[in-house]
Every structure is written in C-alpha cells, then in structure tokens.
C-alpha cells in the first residue's frame, strides 16, 4: 500500500483537554489511486492531509507510508521521506514571491542537493510541462492565479514524488483555471502518481477515482 492509516487520532493542544480534530481514521490508498477528500469545514481534512504528508504527527494510531512505520521514523528520516517522496499543492500557492517561477521550481531540488545544471534544466522542463514556457522569469505576483498554481504543481513535481497531496488546489481559482489544474492532476495520476486531493467542489471530486467523505474527525463513507 502507498498510504495506510490505522485508527489515526489528532488532538490539538489548547483548552482544558485539547481540541480533537481526528477521532480514529482508517483507510488504505494504493499506488496510482486518485482520492478526493471531502467534508464540511473543520471536519479535519487539512489535519489528515498534513499527517499523510509528514508535515504533522498524529496523536495516536498508526500510519504506514509505502509500508514503513512513520511513527517509528526519526525526524531526519521523516523529512527525507517528505522531500523525496511527496509533492504538495496548497490553496494559497505558498510560492516565494521574490523568486522567479523558475527559481521556485528549483528550490526543492537544491534542498535535495542535485547538481546546479541538472536543476535548471529540469525546472525548465517542468514549467514547459505545465504550460508555462516563456514565463520562467516572471515572479508569482506577475502571474495569474491559475499560472501560480501551475508553478506550484511544477515545484511539487521537482523531486519526482510518488505522491501528490493537494489541499483545495482550486479553492482560489475561477472555474476554467480550476478545470485546468484538475486536468493536470488527472494527467499526472495517469502517469502513475498517487494523488490525494481535498476539495469542496463536487464536480471535481466526481472526477477522482475514489471519494473519502469526512465528518467530525471520522470517515463517513
Ligand atoms: N493548529 C491548530 N490548533 C488548534 N486547533 C486546530 C488547529 N488546526 C486545526 N484545528 C482544529 O481542528 C479541526 C479540524 O481542522 P482542519 O483544518 O483539519 O479542518 P478542514 O476540514 O481542513 O476545514 P476547512 O474545510 O475549513 O479547510 C477544526 O476544529 C480546527 O479548529
Ligand atoms: Mg482545510
């Protein structure tokens, strides 16, 4: 299995006894699946995605990534697994506005220690792939929302991840840009990348192979 969750719980610190966000989540996602996660605001979707993406740790339960027990990994093993294996796409893009599109895409490869020349040529290739040839030297503020998200997708692909996690990637986009971003994620999934996407958009969710519906920190269906 690519992703296996067993009774995951998450309680955020605060208040008298903390804020429970996940209350026992179990599911498997196999290689090459495209899963849409839906559910009302506050039901725990981003919390779950952040745990799957090794950005946050669960309070209890088990999480296995490609069969490896994440709870038993050291911090270094976890950050290596995140950098090399997982690409993130967020609603608010999370690009660095003072860097060009090209340099935003280069960044994760620099952290991974790839040689300079290879980094630049792969960044060009990825921007071409997402339809941004000719816009390499623009900064995010000089690009449209849809273009920014395509830079973010190129960046997510930089280290050739097996998994892409997208948290409302179309939340800030109009319907035609949303559709473009969705088509891009579907195309990447066809190439074999496992995709988990949180969305409020029913039409987009219907295009995913699978729907995971959450409610109050548990999976409803
Ligand atoms: N850092 C935090 N500290 C305390 N509580 C938090 C924190 N982050 C989230 N929560 C709480 O955990 C619950 C789940 O939040 P989460 O962000 O996962 O919801 P969501 O399903 O992604 O919602 P939305 O659709 O609005 O993005 C909410 O009740 C929220 O208030
Ligand atoms: Mg959220």
Image (spheres, rainbow, N blue to C red):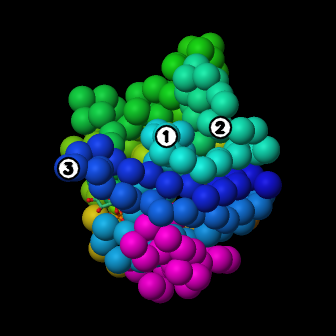
**Does residue 93 appear in this view?**
yes
- Which residue does the image show at 33% across and 48% down from the upper left? 12
Q: Earlier in the sequence, mark 2 or mark 1?
A: 1
- Which residue does the image show at 30% across and 34% down from the upper left? 96
Query: In the rendering, at what x and y percent does residue 163 appear?
Result: 64, 49
Q: Residues within 10 Å of mark 1 (few under 14, many from 20)?
A: some
**Badge 3 is on which residue?**
15
> Magenta stretch?
196-221
Q: Nearer the viewer, residue 124 or 20?
A: 20
- Which residue does the image show at 49% across and 40% down from the upper left? 57
SS for callout 1? loop
Query: In the rendering, at what x and y percent does residue 205 appear?
Result: 52, 79
Q: Residues within 10 Å of mark 3 (few under 14, many from 20)?
A: few
Front: mark 3 or 2 = 3
**Badge 2 is on which residue?**
70
Q: Earlier in the sequence, mark 1 or mark 3?
A: 3
Quarter of the image for the N terminus: give it.
Answer: bottom right
């Amino acid at each position: 299995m690519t992703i296996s969750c067993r009774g995951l719980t998450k309680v955020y610190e605060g208040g008298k006894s903390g804020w429970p966000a996940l209350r026992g989540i179990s599911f498997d996602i196999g290689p090459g699946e495209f899963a849409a996660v839906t559910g009302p605001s506050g039901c725990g979707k981003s919390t779950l995605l952040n745990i799957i993406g090794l950005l946050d740790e669960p309070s209890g339960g088990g999480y296995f990534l490609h069969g490896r027990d994440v709870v038993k990994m050291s911090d270094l093993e976890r950050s290596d697994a995140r950098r090399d294996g997982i690409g993130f796409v967020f609603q608010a893009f999370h690009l660095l506005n003072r860097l060009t599109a090209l340099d935003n895409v280069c960044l994760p490869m620099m952290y991974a220690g790839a040689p300079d020349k290879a980094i630049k040529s792969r960044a060009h290739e990825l921007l071409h792939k997402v339809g941004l040839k000719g816009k390499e030297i623009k900064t995010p503020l000089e690009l449209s929302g849809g273009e920014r998200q395509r830079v973010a997708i190129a960046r997510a692909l930089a280290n050739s991840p097996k998994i892409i996690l997208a948290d409302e990637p179309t939340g800030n986009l109009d319907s035609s840009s949303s559709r473009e971003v969705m088509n891009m994620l579907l195309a990447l999934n066809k190439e074999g990348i496992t995709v988990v996407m949180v969305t409020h958009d029913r039409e987009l969710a219907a295009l995913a192979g699978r729907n995971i519906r959450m409610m109050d920190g548990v999976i409803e269906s």
